Image (spheres, rainbow, N blue to C red):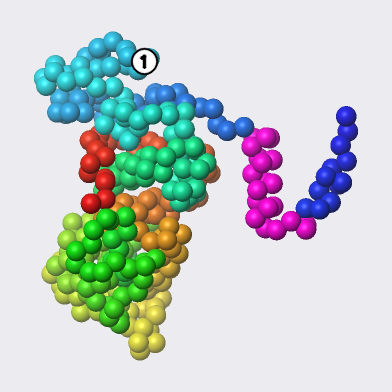
Amino acid sequence: MSVDWLKVYEDFDELSKTDKHRLFEVIKEVLFLPDKLDISKLTDEIRENRFSEGLGCIHCGSVSVKRNGKYRSRQRYLCKDCGKSFNDMTASPISGTHYPHKWLQYFECMIDSMSLPKIAKKLKIHISTAFYWRHKILTALRSLGNQPLNGVIESDETYILESEKGKRVITHRKSRKRGGKAKKRGISKEQVCIVVAMDRNGQIISQNAGFGRISANEIDSVLGKYIGSASVLCTDSATNYKTFAQQKGISHEMINARKGVYVRKKIYHIQHVNAYHKRLKDWIDGFQGVATKYLDNYLFWFRFLEQQKKLPKKELRQSLLLNACKRANHTTIELLKPA
């Protein structure tokens, strides 16, 4: 039976933007069935990535490991030294969770930076389940740490309001409605300082450095061990960075925007890092604020998306999955629960 598609869509332009999106989602569900791949089908890739340097016990690190049968079609291993057993998924975000058929869709939702209520609705899981899955993944991603920065390195800090979102009892101040505003003008201890540093090769460090204006020692605690002595540090004219550069014995190029200087010697500037700040804040605003307790998790999440944004969506999803499962993490719900 032929269909007059022009007649079907003749009222499309009269629909609201919301209704157009709803119609699109319905058509997409009918024409493009959800990915039926179970997470267990990717076990071989997870194993190769996780044990790329050789099979070892995820409990004690011993390489004296033998096969120990299968359970629910998963290969188990036994450590001859500590006597504990494990499989390819043990101590990964996926370990001990239900709905294995929903995990790939969940990783897609994280690639799309979806909020928890939207994820819960889409995957038909409880919002607390969506929360714990998110932070198990992000804690695993964060455990991979930072890579060294080399060459020309731009660095600057940005500030966001301290948040106790999700906390039942706040003792040091009154709760704010919908995030609220700081009581004091400008930079104060009510603001969380995020230090961002990036080199021209695409390596990025982004981390919570403390509250209010930070010292050279606090900058050193974030960046110190990742910057080589042959690097050139580009910052604004703040004295804390000047002191930090002197302490580390590295070359320092200061950009004094107040005097109208934005680029020195046609190569030294902090435009990339300032643009990163803007994208980061716009992204965080999409979650209606982030609790300071979990801020570093979100900073690593955003960094991952930024560094891999040129990958096709399917490859990006797989990269997030493999990175989250790369290192053993014994993260429990008790560690993630808001106080």
Residue placed furthest toward the left? 81
The image position of residue 193, as x and y in percent, is 27, 68
Q: Residue at x 69, y 46 (%)?
A: 23
**Residue at x-position 39% and y-position 24%:** 43
Main SS of the magenta part reads helix
Q: Which residues are magenta?
A: 13-32
Query: Is residue 212 shown above or below 228?
Result: below
Quadrant of residue 3 in the image? Answer: top right
Query: Is 26 situated left or right of 187 in this image?
Result: right
Q: Is residue 74 above or below residue 11?
A: above
Residue 318 position within the rendered picture, expressed as x and y whole percent measured from the top left: 45, 37
Up-down relation of residue 46 to residue 118 (above or below): above
Against 291, residue 326 (above or below) is: above
- Mark 1 lies on a secondary structure that is loop
**In the displayed structure, does residue 100 sit left or right of residue 227?**
right
Front residue of 169/3: it is: 169
- Please state which amino acid type lies under the numbered disc 1: Arg
Asked whether 30 falls inside the magenta stretch, the response is yes
Image quadrant assignment for residue 130: top left
Q: Quadrant of the N terminus?
A: top right
Q: Is residue 44 visible?
A: yes
- For label 1, the residue is 72
